[in-house]
Amino acid sequence: MSPTQWDFPVELCCRPMAFVTLTGLDVVYNAVHRAVWDAFCANRRADRVPISFKVLPGDHEYPKCRPKRTSYEWYIPKGILKTGWMNKHLNLVPALVVVFYELDWDEPQWKEKQSECATRVEIVRQSLQGRNTKVAVVLIQKKTPLPPGEDVIASERAAALCNACELSGKSLFVLPHTDHLVGYIIRLENAFYEHAQTYYYTEIRRVKSHKEFLNKTTHQLLFVRHQFKIAFFSELKQDTQNALKNYRTAYNLVHELRAHETNILEIKTMAGFINYKICRLCFQHNTPLDAIAQFRKHVDLCKKKIGSAELSFEHAAWMAKQFQAFGDLFDEAIKLGLTAIQTQNPGFYYQQAAYYAQERKQLAKTLCSHEASVMYPNPDPLETQTGLLDFYGQRSWRQGILSFDLSDPEKEKVGILAIQLKERSVVHSEIIITLLSNAVAQFKKYKCPRMKSHLSMYPSMPQFHAALNNFKLCTYLFFFIVVQMGEEYYYAKDYTKALKLLDYVLCDYRSEGWWSLLTSILTTALKCSYLMAQLKDYVTYSLELLGRASTLKDDQKSRIEKNLINVLMNESPDPEPDCDILAVKTAQKLWADRVSLAGSNVFTIGVQDFVPFVQCKAKFHAPSFHVDVPVHFDIYLKADCPHPIRFSKLCVSFNNQEYNQFCVIEEASKASEVLENLTQGKMCLVPGKTRKFLFKFVAKTEDVGKKIEITSVDLVLGSETGRCVVLNWQGGGGDAASSQEALQASRSFKRRPKLPASELHWDSIVIQASTMIISRVPNISVHLRHDPPALTNEMYCLVVTVQSHEKTEIRDVKLTAGLKPGQDANLTQKTQVTLRGTELCDESYPALLTDIPVGDLRPGEQLEKMLYVRCGTVGSRMFLVYVSYLINTTIEEKEIVCKCHKDETVTIETVFPFDVAVKFVSTKFEHLERVYADIPFLLMTDLLSASPWALTIVSSELQLAPSMTAVDQLESQLDKVVLQTGESASECFCLRCPSVGNVEGGVATGHYIISWKRTSAMENIPVISTVITLPHVIVENIPLHVNADLPSFGRVRESLPVRYHLQNKTNLVQDVEVSVEPSDAFMFSGLKQIRLRILPGTEQEMLYNFYPLMAGYQQLPSLNINLLRFPNFTNQLLRRFIPTSIFVKPQGRLMDDTSIAAA
């Protein structure tokens, strides 16, 4: 048996296409014929009909057709399907034979040519005698034919040729050899395809006609055979739906056959063939779930049909092939556009195929382990006369025998022996590795081991857990396959690849905590490294197998520890158990060469990625140290090996390498003393006991404010005379299992046992690999004195008092003060700090003054510094006062210069000093929304103090805009006024606005400038000027202005003269109607009603004498004016300019003597 006997036949795996033979073409010597053949075969795109062409000579002998059976009554089939049947209909028996002949319609020797063509057709028919193969004739012509019906001669000669060749008109074709040859060929192909389909349809009907002669008692095999043939012919006909239907029926019929040890292989073989066809068609129809369901059904039905126990490895081989074939189909479908997912991809089927291949290997190892004296049978029972079996799945020594009873048991025994001996020559590891490689390639393709980052795409918890479970399944399976590959490479003695694959998964096995599996893999890896004499790998795996993650027994660990010491002493280790004898001998030679060669004896092994037999933790005593205090830290070590062990050196490295020299412990020892004198020496580690090493050093002053980190801890095993292994922990220690163990310890409620006072629980030690160097504690006091809140734009005084409490003089005292960094950028722009309070700050001054030298201070001495802050906006600000100085101090008998500092912060609120309200009123003190051109009005300012401190208003100033003029002189009315909290002060200015036309948004008024300072401020503090922008005012023009001259009061029964002045403000002559309405409180004399004209820019005066009749606040007679040109000028507007009432005093009495006496 060859290793490929389980491979499916090529004719089963290919796509069935109609077989058409072409005769009469000389493709070697005739250029025209060669061009025709190339057009048929070259560049066949997917849109061309599926036909398989073959050029054969005209007298080719086709397979003979057996005589037609008229009855199946006494016929007993010898098997299900003959091994040559599929190939016969794919490549030997054509559906159509095409005879090519060069003949033009105008051929002069037409009769002779016609006769020769008919002879060729007859020869083809004779060679196809008994078959339903179609025959067609193609005439190769030099000229392009005329359209049908136009060439009468062509029609007549075509009919004559069809009669001579006994062909129908549909079987005669013309092929002009012109520039459009490919187009004619494609048309010919379509016609050939129709003929081929007719042939396969006829064949299907022929096979179906046999069914009525069959019975299920003796013809069960024929039912399967005929159903398979119908399905296969349907495929050739490209009727894949009917093909799938008939294959399913054939599959069910196969499993209805009575199975026995003698025919079980044939049943499984045919079931595998038909299952392959069904799955292939399901993938072709884009129904992958149907293909998967069919394959699962197939496996469930066949996995128990093992057959002969002595040949059970054949069943495993057959199962492996089923999974491999389905994986190939799945992969092919994906390449054609099918979408696969992580949990359903071809990798699963390749992995299962590898599993059965491994099972085959184990069974073969058990069943084929014959003694060397057992010889292969002669003659060979596995050979046949033709070299092939007659029927698929049958044994070569009993072909065609369907009896369940073995006629020749001895022959059966010899045949089984031959199969077993053949199986011994199979290289199983190559088969397994190939399958596992395919599986790994698929899992890598679908990123199964790297999908953790994609789990966030599942928003809900059920979806997340389902995705997580699928991910874990894929990941675990991927790792399992890689380990299997590594082990197979080990068995195949390819130790380099084995070690590479095993090392690939070790990290993940450690992170998952699969310690027993990890131990098994490490054991195999140790064997590989030993057999290859890989020194560093051997030491690394030995270190881990001695550690706490290893599940080996103590005697095994002791052996590994002994070998490790031998290697460190530059001696060869003892062989690993269960290794191949020849490989061990080769390895011993390699180790001998390693010992004799002089090379690098120091190996540095980073332990952060594995679990060595020594644990390490580094811990600083505090998260920070002052620069004048020594830095203390501890290194904790714990050994997990079975025996005590001595190390030669412990050194600690920092991010500042200048400290490395202070943190080294070294003990001189020989290589042979690693396991001797274990009760002595400071570098001896006892298994299970925690050992602590104390280190200290003095930090450098330039590292103040920096972090000191332990970058690595190195523990040296061995000596320079032999071999030296440096165990390197990154950071403060810890290995691949530390984080998981720490998590478990934190979740554990198990009480820890009591230990002696000198010992520590390892789990209670927490790694602290970094510390901060901070400055020496300052011994000074800093006090801030000020009067909050600050007022906007004032020079706010902040007094800083610094007093030294140090025992020695402090030098180079510097002060940094101002706005604390990190606040809003707007505050930085609107805050200025200075030391000179006599000058007013502008925006060029900084917000923070840095490194202001203030000299030296003796013990107990103090100094004061005044800072002046100007805040341009209101709100809270945080100010920083930072004092630094230098002082000499002694630490560890070493004098150093320490830089100390102390800072104080204060939050200062800034408020407005006062609120300013501005309003426009008329000369009658009535509120104005707008003013009128050239009409006087009043501007009133109200100043309300908002400061908690008394304010002195030094002066005020009104700066008018060009559009405004003052009626009288502008003088400050608030000079030297002192305002307490809540007090207010007002000013009033009489202004006039000339006519400026219609200005959108109003007319600018100007600015109101207030100069002020705190009343309590010193004389040299500058005065602050606050500029208030006055609001714009709307200015309107009026056609007529009226004002009145009258006394401030009247008296009853005394004449009250009143003059009204009417002024025309336009460029037009105004027609004015004036009337006076009487009042009950007055009599008057003058024009009660008059109509007059006022020239442009002139004024008209009207005089009235009012005679008060009643005392009190009385309403004057109302003056009504009507402008004929300006009807919108109303009396309501008029009353804004003239008084409407006046106070009338009562009439005074004359004092005489009588009245005086009465009083």
Image (tube, grey):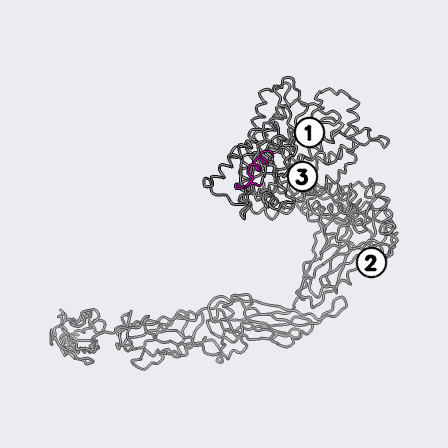
Which residue sits at x=68%, y=39%?
351
Q: Residues within 10 Å of mark 3 (few under 14, many from 20)?
A: many
- In the rendered structure, which amino acid carries the disc numbered 2? Glu
Residue 85 is situated, as x and y percent measured from the top left of the image, at 65, 30
Label 1–label 3 contact, CB within 8 A: no
Label 1 vs label 3: CA separation? 25 Å
Spatial CA span between label 2 and label 1: 77 Å
For residue 209: magenta?
A: no
Q: Amino acid at mark 1?
A: Tyr
- Element type where label 3 sits in the image: helix
Magenta-tinted stretch: 102-119
**Residue closer to the observer: 244 or 716:** 244
Foreground label between 2 and 1: 1
Q: Quadrant of residue 167?
A: top right
Indicate which disc, 3 or 2, sits on the residue closer to the N terminus.
Answer: 3
Dot 1, crowdedness within 10 Å: few (<14), some or many (≥20)? many
| Image point (70%, 32%), residue name | 318
Q: Which mark is residue 377?
A: none
Above or below for 34 versus 898: above
In magenta segment, residue 107? yes
Which residue, given by chain and number where applicable, does mark 2 sit on? 666
Q: Residue furthest bottom?
A: 969
Q: Which residue is mark 1?
A: 392
Residue reaching furthest front?
A: 108
| Residue 560 visible in the shown view | yes
First in sequence: mark 2 vs mark 1: 1
